[in-house]
Amino acid sequence: MKDSHFRQLVGSKLTRVEFVHDYIQFAFGNIGLSALTRVTLSDKGTASSQGEPGFNKKLQSLVNDRVAQINFRPQEALIITFEERSTIEISLRPDHYTCPEGINLYLPDGTIVVE
C-alpha cells in the first residue's frame, strides 16, 4: 500500500526544498515529503550527505527537476530518481532513525503516510 502512495511522486516536479532544524522538507507541487533521517544526493557519479559542505546548494539545484522513478525499500531506503538522473536517497534503516518516523508523505487528498 505505501509503495503506491510513494509512486504518486512519479512525474511530479520538485518545487521546493526547505531545511528545518535537523530534517528536510520537499514539495512536489501539492505533495509534501519530510525526510527525518539521513538524506544522500547522488549526481554525476558523486554522492554527498546532509551536513557535508555544499550539500544544501546541490539539493536546491534539483528544484524544477521531475521525478522519473521511485524505489521504496522498507527498512532500507526511499530512492527518488529524477529525469536528469540525479537521485535522492532517504535512509529507512532503523539505526538512522532519531525519532519514531523516517519519512512523512502528505498527499493532496489529506492522506498522511508515515514510514
Image: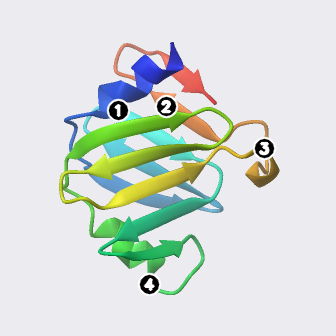
Q: Residues within 10 Å of mark 3 (few under 14, many from 20)?
A: some
**Rendered location of residue 99, percent (x, y):** 79, 44
Q: Which residue is mark 4?
A: 54
Q: Point out which mark residue 42 bears.
A: none
Q: Are marks 1 and 2 in contact (CB under 8 Å)?
A: yes
The kind of secondary structure element at disc 1 is strand
Question: Gap in Å between the C-alphas at discs 4 and 1?
Answer: 26 Å
Task: Tell me which corner region of the image, top left, top right, bottom left or bottom right, holds residue 110.
Answer: top left
Q: Which residue is mark 3?
A: 94
Q: Which residue is mark 1?
A: 31
Q: Amino acid at mark 1?
A: Ile
Q: Earlier in the sequence, mark 2 or mark 3?
A: 3
7 displayed left or right of 66: right
Q: Earlier in the sequence, mark 1 or mark 2?
A: 1
64 displayed left or right of 18: left
Q: Which residue is mark 2?
A: 105
**Rendered location of residue 91, percent (x, y):** 62, 50
Q: Amino acid at mark 2?
A: Leu
Q: Earlier in the sequence, mark 3 or mark 4?
A: 4
The kind of secondary structure element at disc 4 is loop
Q: Earlier in the sequence, mark 3 or mark 1?
A: 1
Residue at 25% x, 50% y is 15
The kind of secondary structure element at disc 3 is helix
**Rendered location of residue 80, percent (x, y):** 38, 46
**Rendered location of residue 51, percent (x, y):** 60, 76
